[in-house]
Image: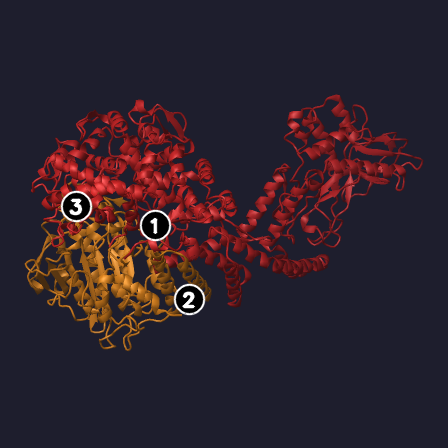
């Protein structure tokens, strides 16, 4: 059985025809082993992309200065303790996200910079976390973990599917990666072993079915069915690889197996608790080297979350329950700022947790890149000519924190350049990604 | 490059005449206009907004990409183009251009009419998956997709469009887990597979038991049953499965009643009552019947005799050494002699009476009368004629004991009794009380049967003719009036130890009441129970344990007679199990054909068989392997996807009958075809549009149409998730959470009514009825009786009616704590009327943080919308919302300013004016939008230009939902698919 045929096709689809060639040149995707260029005894670099929708307070997302002296706007205050491990980047944007509708067309391509299809079609671009998952991520049991704390919205809005507003991670241009909302099931995805030979036989059988079916259906349908074929192969591979882990010789993850119990079934009532549960799990995934790439959508763009447990400033004595996140963003008031800070506090929780785990000479945070972003600068304006983005963590010593970079005045200020830089930290050097042709040298 | 309907567009050029005229105009007037007003920005070089209009050099070019020109038209109509800062088109220029483009699009639409369009392969949506599994298994409680990621929407905004139904390794694992979970509900029966809501053998056994009990309950009454104590344990004993005497007796005098009863038994009873053959006991009942006694009186007599002529033994003793043979045992109170005993109180009884009743020529000899007192010597008593005098000082616990025997000269029989009171009334045969004697020595629980005694035995000569006669008469009575028809407890617990797990005794029921089919059914139910519970195998274990147990404090030998039958039965059962294995595999294959919505190919059958073999080799038990086979069927792409075989070439071709059945069934029921639809597909008749449309009509009446109400109706109105909506401030609206389910239910019921009663779609706007329960009625300030759901007529007079007044829609299009005329207006405009609104600009001015105290919600919005950048659109949106300000953010009625001027200048005040406006002035727009959505939902794709003729024919119809669905299912787009080479060229 030719196991490469499908991953290759998946890859081709994943990058889009126009980008395929440069990728082929730069990527070692045909071999079983991902390209490695670092000493084997070092801890691997991990990527954690986090997202919150509807932007931030129009005046309080900023950072100035360097190192210890870095000053932060009110939104970012909760990250004060990590300012020396944080990179603040100003002025990046996605050209494609400036076209089309507000919200959906700004978010569905957050991590790819791809054009977005309207008119009832679903088409964006493979996001950079998934490109990494399909290459770098292959060496762990779970190539990537895609989590969310708000369920997606099943409707079409202004001719754009609301899938766009709730999916930043895309496994292929037509496949928004399904989101896991349940902490218990995310735990299972990481740690449950699916090693039964009977499962394997069943998967072999349905794979054969799919290949038969593929011959009889239209080309268009074949492309859709390939999602299924690729998924079956992936699960089969996971069964084969069950028990295998950490192919880095000489380096061992700090944990062999999970040190927390499987979370309770269901979704935690409190949104903050939900977010922290998901963060605990992704940290555990890193710590056990079960996965190296996670994407956590804290809420949707167009989010309907409310915050009854967060004391309101504007309506003293009450929680911020009177408006959903999306509409609150339009108000740009003190409560909106407070909600922004709440999200960044959760981010600080994640950073703190990662920073408390020692991996040899460095902490897990030092070996990680947490990139937090949103699809617009201020919800009140829906403006995305500059996108809010920060990167926390050291990428295994390759990323220097305590800096602010400003591209506002530059001409080549594609957000995708940042993604290219980050992929580079993980040993992937595509010549082109999205609308970018080069990395950000400064990063 | 996007999907294009280029093949059809090219074909459209055949419309030569008009095309030629269009071509002339294009060169002379259109192209110059485009060059002047559009192409400076939308040039091949600049491509502003990714739009290049310069490359369209001919009519053919334009017709090849109609979608782009539909977009151009929209932009012009919305006033977005040319941009406001640029010189605008003169009115006649605008008309010229839009008319011309419109005409060309019309030509394309006509030429390509009926194009099946590009339909992306559809995975079952979460709801379709759930409904399908419920229908396949018959288990309504299954909710396998509960924790699946939410499906996205595409096409016309529904979750049944392929593009938004994705797959991933994580999701595939979930499907595998769910499939295995469903398979764990599969119950292996002797004949095949069935599905249960439960997943343990114990529960399945209980279900099988319940089925048998339900069967028995159709014929018998549950007896009162009595509790007895044995060695400190409460045990059930006594009667169950009792013959319901009274109704049958009453029915002998009322023909109407007879029709509701079992005819077989009723006929037999009637014949017996009318019979002339003498019968010492039955004659007692016949006399009553003829004398006009009530059914209750007759039943009382019968019951007394049932008690005299039957007794119940412990199931726990059946089969033991000296044990009974059955639960219900006949009793024959005939004897040549009997010792009678009666207990005497310490004082008060001075005489006892010796009573005898002769049948034929017979008499009794009384002898050996005595007083027996524990610890004392027996004292003889003198008999004086038919009396005996009791001494005064008999003490406590004394008994009068006497022996009666048949006089040797007797030809007949004589019933004898000892009474403490002198009998009154005419002498007659009475029913004897039967007593089970206590053993002389202390027994153990392993002991067998004990002897019986009677208080009114019938003395008769041992080998006499009279004895034969009486025996036969008693048997006849018993045959007509068994004490029980069947043992309905089934699980015996009437002894400390009972070896039998399930006890069957229903010969009387079968004999008296059941016909051939019913006998076959109850036999099958018992076979199921035995098979599902594996009782024969378990009884071996139970027997071995009992053996060990009995050696401790009882005599194990008592159980020895049970050993061989138990082991033999277990052996037979194992053979039965093995013999059933191929049937289970076959049943899994039959399940696959249903799940995959078509007959299986030879290859598929072989493959499924070999997977079963493979799994067995992997050391899976038969049951586990069969369940894994079921799981494999459910995780297969044939189940999860609605694949359709494509034909070669460019031309569209009809899908086959099975695919068509699937299309229809998922359209109307969100699930796989039922047996009826399947039959038509098998017979190859479904492709006949008349047959297909008739099926659609049938399906619309079915309860499963609720799914169309939810999946289409609620999704279209954007209220599909109101029942779980968590967007309202509990502080402002504490009642919302408890009402949200009812709000959605109102919408669902409204649509069900629309579908099942073939109403006009316009009733969505102008209905004068709705559906409410008590809580929703209270919410609406309506006066209704009762708690349940009911139809409410005259809702218009209460200020509602149709979708505009649903709490669900009003609440959904509101904020967390206040209404939003913008949301409601946008919804009405875009969702309900299908208006195209420009995309809101980025960088809109910020709303005031807080509504100043003196501003209403409406005034707040008016202030916002006054902004120059916004007013253009808001003038078109907000008035619709203002007209609905008479409802708060969860849809309650309230006082508010509802006067407004609609975009076309019509003044309205409140919901009823708005409704009239919509029906009278925008009726066609509403219908067009509804049809567009319904068509898009039915096809699983966006509606395109080539669908326009179909939609127009729907708009011109009588607007009844049945008609619209009829038009859809008969259309080529519903029945055909594009050829393999016709599709997308990227």
Mark 1 lies on a secondary structure that is loop
Q: Judge left or right: residue B542 versus residue B437.
A: left
Q: Earlier in the sequence, mark 3 or mark 2?
A: 2
- Which of the labelled discs sits on residue A329, or is there none? 3
Q: Position of residue B755 (x, y in %)?
A: 40, 34
Mark 2 lies on a secondary structure that is loop
For the residues labelled 1 and 2, the Cα–Cα distance comes to: 37 Å
B790 or B537: nearer the eye?
A: B790
Q: Position of residue B401 (x, y in %)?
A: 81, 38
Residue drawn at the location 68% of the way across and 43% of the way down: B506
Question: Quadrant where the C terminus of chain A lies?
Answer: bottom left
Mark 1: few/some/many CA within 10 Å (<14, 14-19, 20+): many
For the residues labelled 3 and 2, the Cα–Cα distance comes to: 47 Å
B853 or B135: nearer the eye?
A: B135
> Residue B157 appears in which quarter of the rendering?
top left
Which chain appears orange? A
Which chain appears red? B
Tell me the chain of label 1. B
Mark 3: few/some/many CA within 10 Å (<14, 14-19, 20+): many
Any part of residue A353 in sight: no
A327 or B225: nearer the eye?
A: A327
Q: Judge left or right: residue B381 versus residue B192.
A: right
Any part of residue B55 in sight: yes
């Amino acid at each position: 059985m030719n196991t490469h045929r499908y991953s290759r096709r998946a890859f081709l689809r994943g990058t889009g025809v126009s980008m395929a060639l440069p990728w082929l040149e730069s990527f070692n995707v045909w071999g079983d082993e991902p390209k490695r260029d670092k000493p084997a005894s070092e801890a691997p670099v991990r990527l954690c992309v986090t997202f919150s929708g509807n932007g931030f307070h129009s005046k309080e997302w900023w950072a100035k200065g360097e190192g210890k002296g870095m000053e932060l706007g009110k939104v970012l205050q909760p990250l004060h303790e990590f300012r020396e491990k944080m990179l603040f980047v100003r002025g990046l944007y996605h050209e494609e996200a400036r076209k089309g509708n507000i919200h959906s067309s700004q978010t569905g391509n957050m991590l790819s910079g791809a054009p977005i299809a309207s008119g009832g079609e679903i088409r964006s671009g493979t996001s950079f976390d998934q490109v990494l998952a399909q290459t770098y991520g292959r060496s762990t049991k779970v190539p990537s973990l895609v989590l969310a704390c708000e369920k997606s919205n099943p409707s079409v809005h202004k001719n754009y599917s609301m899938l766009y507003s709730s999916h930043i991670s895309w496994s292929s241009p037509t496949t928004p990666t399904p989101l896991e909302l349940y902490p218990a099931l995310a735990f299972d995805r990481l740690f449950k072993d699916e090693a039964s030979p009977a499962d394997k036989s069943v998967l072999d059988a349905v794979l054969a079915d799919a290949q038969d079916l593929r011959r009889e259906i239209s080309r268009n349908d074949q492309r859709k069915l390939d999602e299924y074929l690729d998924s079956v192969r992936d699960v089969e591979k996971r069964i084969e690889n069950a028990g295998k882990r950490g192919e880095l010789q000489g380096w061992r993850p700090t944990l062999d197996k999970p040190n927390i119990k499987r979370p309770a079934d269901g979704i935690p009532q409190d949104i903050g608790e939900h977010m922290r549960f998901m963060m605990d799990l992704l940290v555990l995934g890193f710590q056990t080297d079960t996965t190296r790439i996670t994407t956590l959508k804290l809420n949707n763009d167009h989010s309907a979350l409310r915050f009854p447990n967060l004391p309101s400033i504007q309506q003293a004595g009450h929680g911020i329950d009177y408006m959903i996140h999306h509409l609150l963003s339009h108000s740009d008031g003190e409560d909106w700022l407070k909600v922004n800070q709440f999200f960044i506090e959760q981010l600080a929780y994640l950073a703190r947790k990662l920073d408390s785990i020692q991996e040899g000479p460095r902490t897990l945070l030092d070996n990680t890149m947490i990139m937090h972003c949103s699809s617009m600068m201020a919800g009140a304006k829906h403006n995305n000519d500059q996108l809010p983005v920060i990167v926390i963590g050291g990428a295994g010593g390759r990323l220097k924190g305590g800096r602010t970079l400003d591209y506002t005045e530059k001409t080549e200020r594609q957000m995708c350049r940042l993604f290219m830089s980050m992929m580079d930290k993980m040993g992937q050097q595509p010549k082109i990604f999205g609308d970018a042709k080069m990395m950000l040298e400064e990063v | 490059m996007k999907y294009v309907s280029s093949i059809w567009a090219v074909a459209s050029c055949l419309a030569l005449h008009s095309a030629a005229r269009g071509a002339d105009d294009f060169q002379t007037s259109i192209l110059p206009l485009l060059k002047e007003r559009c192409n400076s920005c939308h040039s091949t070089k600049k491509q502003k907004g990714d739009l290049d209009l310069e490359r369209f050099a001919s009519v053919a070019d334009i017709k090849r990409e109609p979608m782009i020109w539909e977009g151009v038209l929209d932009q012009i109509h919305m006033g977005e183009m040319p941009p406001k800062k640029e010189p605008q088109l003169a009115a006649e220029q605008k008309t010229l251009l839009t008319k011309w483009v419109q005409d060309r699009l019309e030509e394309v639409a006509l030429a390509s009419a009926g194009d099946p369009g590009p339909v992306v392969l559809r995975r079952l949506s979460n709801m379709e998956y759930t409904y399908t599994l419920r229908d396949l298994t018959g288990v309504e409680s299954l909710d396998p997709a509960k924790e699946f990621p939410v499906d996205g929407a595409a096409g016309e905004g529904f979750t049944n469009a392929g593009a938004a139904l994705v797959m991933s390794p994580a999701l595939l694992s979930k499907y595998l887990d769910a499939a295995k979970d469903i398979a764990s509900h599969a119950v292996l029966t002797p004949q095949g597979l069935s599905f249960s809501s439960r997943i343990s053998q114990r529960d399945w056994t209980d279900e099988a038991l319940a089925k048998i009990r339900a069967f028995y309950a159709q014929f018998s009454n549950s007896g009162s049953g009595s509790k007895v104590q044995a060695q400190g344990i409460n045990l059930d004993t006594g009667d169950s499965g009792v013959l319901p005497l009274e109704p049958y007796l009453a029915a002998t005098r009322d023909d109407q009643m007879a029709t509701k009863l079992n005819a077989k038994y009723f006929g037999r009873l009637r014949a017996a009552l009318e019979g002339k053959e003498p019968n010492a006991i039955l004659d007692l009942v016949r006399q009553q019947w003829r004398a006009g006694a009530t059914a209750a009186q007759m039943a009382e007599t019968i019951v007394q005799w049932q008690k005299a002529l039957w007794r119940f033994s412990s199931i726990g003793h059946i089969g033991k050494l000296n044990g009974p043979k059955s639960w219900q045992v006949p009793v024959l109170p005939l004897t040549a002699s009997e010792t009678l005993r009666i207990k005497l109180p310490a004082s008060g009884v001075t005489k006892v009476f010796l009573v005898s009743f002769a049948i034929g020529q017979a008499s009794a000899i009384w002898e050996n009368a005595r007083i027996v007192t524990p610890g004392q010597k027996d004292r003889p008593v003198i008999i004086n004629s038919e009396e005996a005098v009791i001494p005064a000082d008999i003490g406590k616990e004394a008994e009068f004991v006497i022996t009666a025997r048949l006089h040797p000269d007797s030809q007949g029989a004589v019933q004898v009794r000892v009474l403490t009171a002198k009998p009154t009334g005419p002498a007659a045969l009475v029913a004897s009380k039967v007593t089970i004697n206590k053993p002389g020595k202390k027994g153990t629980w392993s002991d067998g049967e004990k002897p019986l005694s009677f208080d009114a035995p019938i003395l008769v000569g041992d080998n006499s003719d009279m004895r034969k006669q009486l025996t036969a008469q008693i048997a006849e009575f018993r045959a007509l009036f068994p004490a029980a028809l069947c043992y309905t407890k089934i699980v015996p617990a009437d002894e400390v130890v009972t070896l039998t797990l399930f006890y069957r005794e229903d010969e009387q029921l079968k004999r008296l009441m059941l016909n051939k089919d019913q006998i076959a059914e109850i036999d099958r139910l018992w076979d199921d129970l035995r098979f599902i519970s594996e009782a024969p195998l378990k009884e071996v274990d139970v027997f071995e344990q009992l053996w060990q147990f009995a050696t401790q404090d009882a005599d194990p030998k008592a159980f020895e007679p049970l050993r061989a039958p138990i082991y033999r039965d277990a052996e037979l059962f194992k053979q039965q199990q093995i013999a059933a294995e191929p049937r289970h595999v076959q049943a899994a294959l039959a399940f696959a054909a249903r799940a995959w919505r078509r007959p299986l190919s030879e290859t598929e059958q072989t493959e499924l068989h070999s997977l079963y073999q493979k799994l067995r080799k992997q050391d899976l038990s038969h049951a586990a392997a069969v369940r894994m086979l079921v799981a494999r069927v459910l995780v297969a792409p044939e189940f999860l996807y609605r694949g359709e075989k494509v034909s070669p070439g460019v031309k569209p071709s009809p899908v086959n009958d099975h695919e068509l059945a699937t299309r229809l069934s998922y359209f109307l029921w969100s699930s796989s075809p039922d047996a009826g639809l399947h039959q038509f597909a098998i017979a190859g008749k479904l492709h006949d549009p008349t047959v297909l449309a008739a099926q659609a009509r049938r399906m619309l009446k079915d309860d499963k149409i609720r799914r169309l109400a939810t999946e289409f109706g609620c999704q279209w109105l954007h209220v599909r998730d109101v029942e779980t909506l968590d967007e309202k401030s509990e502080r402002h609206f504490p009642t919302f959470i408890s009402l949200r389910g009812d709000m959605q239910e109102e919408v669902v019921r409204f649509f069900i009514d629309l579908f099942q009663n073939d109403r006009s779609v316009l009733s969505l706007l102008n209905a004068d009825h709705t559906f409410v329960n008590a809580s929703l009625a209270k919410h609406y300030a309506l006066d209704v009786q009762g708690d349940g759901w009911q139809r409410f007529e005259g809702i218009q007079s209460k200020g509602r009616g149709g979708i505009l007044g649903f709490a669900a829609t009003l609440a959904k299009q509101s904020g967390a704590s206040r209404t939003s005329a913008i949301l409601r207006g946008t919804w009405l405009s875009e969702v309900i009327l299908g208006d195209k609104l420009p995309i809101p600009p980025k960088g809109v001015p910020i709303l005031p943080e807080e509504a100043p105290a003196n501003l209403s919600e409406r005034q707040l919005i008016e202030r916002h919308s006054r902004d120059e950048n916004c007013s253009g659109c808001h003038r078109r949106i907000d008035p619709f919302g203002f007209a609905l300000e008479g409802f708060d953010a969860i849809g309650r009625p309230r006082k508010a300013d509802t006067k407004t001027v609609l975009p076309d200048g019509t003044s309205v005040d409140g919901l009823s004016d708005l409704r009239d406006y919509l029906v009278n002035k925008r009726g066609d727009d509403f219908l067009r939008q509804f049809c567009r959505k319904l068509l898009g939902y039915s096809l699983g794709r966006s509606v395109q230009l080539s669908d326009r003729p179909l939609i127009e024919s729907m708009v011109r119809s009588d607007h009844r939902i049945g008609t619209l669905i009829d038009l859809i299912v008969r259309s080529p787009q519903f029945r055909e698919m594009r050829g393999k080479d016709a599709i997308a060229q990227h």
